[in-house]
Image (cartoon, rainbow, N blue to C red):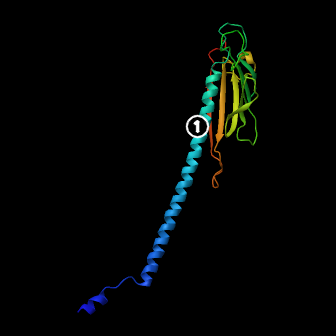
């Protein structure tokens, strides 16, 4: 009787082990594939978020400083907008109230130049240095100027509103979709420009 019991206790056959391993490998392949897709999606979303933050931060800083254009507490009469093109904007303000706009951080110029460099948006302040990188991965920046009636103008003394458009792109190109882009536009009315 004990002999018959021993024969009934059989293990897995070689075929069953091979089939089990094959199923396990297929499941592992599917799991790795899903993981890679999720990893790529996460990486792309992280880059898009970073791009949006860069564009938003650049826009916020420009809007804040442009709103101060023309600040002239002593009424010395300078024009708050200096050089102005679609790719360059110079703003002037008398922040320390001494009657001039030549002191530190009172003459600020934003410049966009079309280049393959990752930081073509630059800023220059009257602090003794030249243009410095302002925002990374900017693919476009445009300034448009309007008078008090909303009509486009380039005459510095007539400018009452400035439309800023900043386009950013992701740092790396996705192999399937290329770069992702995001654009932010703001219409700024500097309160200190005379009406």
State which quadrant residue 5 falls in. bottom left
Q: What residue is rendered at 58% in x and 37% in y?
A: 53
For the N terminus, the quadrant is bottom left
State which quadrant residue 56 falls in. top right
Tell me if I can see residue 81 in this picture: yes
Q: Residues within 10 Å of mark 1 (few under 14, many from 20)?
A: few
In the orientation shown, which residue stands out farthest toward the front?
Answer: 2
Helix, strand or loop status at disc 1: helix
Percent from the top left, x then y, of residue 142?
A: 70, 31
Q: Is residue 4 above or below residue 83?
A: below
Q: Left or right: 111 with respect to 177?
A: right
Percent from the top left, x then y, of residue 82?
A: 75, 19
Q: Residue at label 1?
A: 53
Q: What residue is rendered at 63% in x and 32% in y?
A: 58
Percent from the top left, x then y, of residue 94?
A: 68, 14
Q: What residue is rendered at 64% in x and 18% in y?
A: 68
Tell me if I can see residue 86 in this picture: no
Q: Left or right: 143 with respect to 15?
A: right
Percent from the top left, x then y, of residue 20?
A: 44, 76
Q: Is residue 177 above or below residue 122?
A: below
For the C terminus, the quadrant is top right
Q: What residue is rendered at 47% in x and 68% in y?
A: 27
Q: Is residue 186 above or below residue 137?
A: above
């Amino acid at each position: 009787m004990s002999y018959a019991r021993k024969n009934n206790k059989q293990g897995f056959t070689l075929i069953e082990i091979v089939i089990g391993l094959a199923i396990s490998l297929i499941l592992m392949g599917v799991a790795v594939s899903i993981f890679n897709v999720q990893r790529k999606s996460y990486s792309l979303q992280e880059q898009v978020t970073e791009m949006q933050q860069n564009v938003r931060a650049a826009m916020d800083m420009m809007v804040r400083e442009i709103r101060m254009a023309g600040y002239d507490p002593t009424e010395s009469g300078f024009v708050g907008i200096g050089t102005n093109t679609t790719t360059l904007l110079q703003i002037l303000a008398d922040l320390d109230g001494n009657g001039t706009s030549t002191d530190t951080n009172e003459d600020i110029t934003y410049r966009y130049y079309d280049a393959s460099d990752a930081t073509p948006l630059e800023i220059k302040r009257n602090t003794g240095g030249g243009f410095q990188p302002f925002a990374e991965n900017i693919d476009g920046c445009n300034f448009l100027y309007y008078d008090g009636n909303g009509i486009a103008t380039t005459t510095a003394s007539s400018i009452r509103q400035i439309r800023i458009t900043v386009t950013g792109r992701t740092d790396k190109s996705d192999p399937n979709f290329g770069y992702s882009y995001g654009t932010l536009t703001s219409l700024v009315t500097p309160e200190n420009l005379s009406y």
